[in-house]
Amino acid sequence: LLQLSAQFNDDLKTALSGNSALEERVRELSQNHRKEREKCEKQLQDVNNICSMLESDIKKLTTKYQMREELIELKSARQHEQNELRDEVALLREQIGEERNAKLAMERDLLAQVNHLQTQLGIAASKVSTFCATLYQPLTHG
C-alpha cells in the first residue's frame, strides 16, 4: 500500500507537472493569440482608413471627371458658336461689299444723271439766252 501510495504520488506529481506545462503553454498561446489579434485589429483599422481615403479620392476624381466633361461640352458649344459667328461675319461682310458696290453703282448713275441734267440745263439756258437776245435785238435797232 505504501508503494501504491508512493506510485500514486509520483503519478500525481507527474500529472501536475504536465498540467503546469500545459497551462504555461496555454498562457503562451493565449498571449500570442491576443498579440496577433491586436495586430489584425490594427491592420483592419489601417485597411478601413485606406478604404475611407480611397472613397474620398474616388469622389474627388468623379467630381473632377464630371467637371472635365462639362468643360469639354462648354468648349464644344463655344467652338460651335464661334463657327456660327464667323459664318455670320463672313456673310455680313459679303453683304456689306455687295451694298457698297450697289451704292457706288448708284452714285455713278446719279452722277451721270446730274451731269446729263446739267448739260440739258446748259443747253436750255443757252437757248433761253439766245431767244432773249433775239427778242431784244429788234428793239435796240429799231
Image (tube, grey):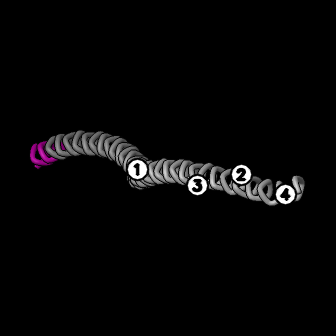
Picture residue at 35% right of the left edge, 41% below the top: 39
- The first of marks 2 and 1 along the sequence is 1
The circle on residue 83 is 1
Tag 4: amino acid: Tyr
Q: Give the main secondary structure, helix, strand or loop, of the magenta stretch.
A: helix
Where in the figure is residue 134, as x and y percent of width and height?
77, 56
Which residues are the magenta region?
1-9
Whether residue 107 appears in magenta in the rendering, the answer is no
Assess disc 2: are there few (<14), some (14-19) or many (≥20) residues with their C-alpha within 10 Å of its C-alpha.
Answer: few
Where in the figure is residue 123, as x and y percent of width and height?
66, 52
Assess disc 3: are there few (<14), some (14-19) or many (≥20) residues with their C-alpha within 10 Å of its C-alpha.
Answer: few
Alpha carbon distance from label 1 to label 4: 77 Å
The mark lying in front, picked from 4 and 3, is 4
The circle on residue 113 is 3
- As drawn, is 14 to the left or to the right of 81? left
- As drawn, is 89 to the left or to the right of 8? right
Q: Is residue 70 above or below residue 18?
A: below
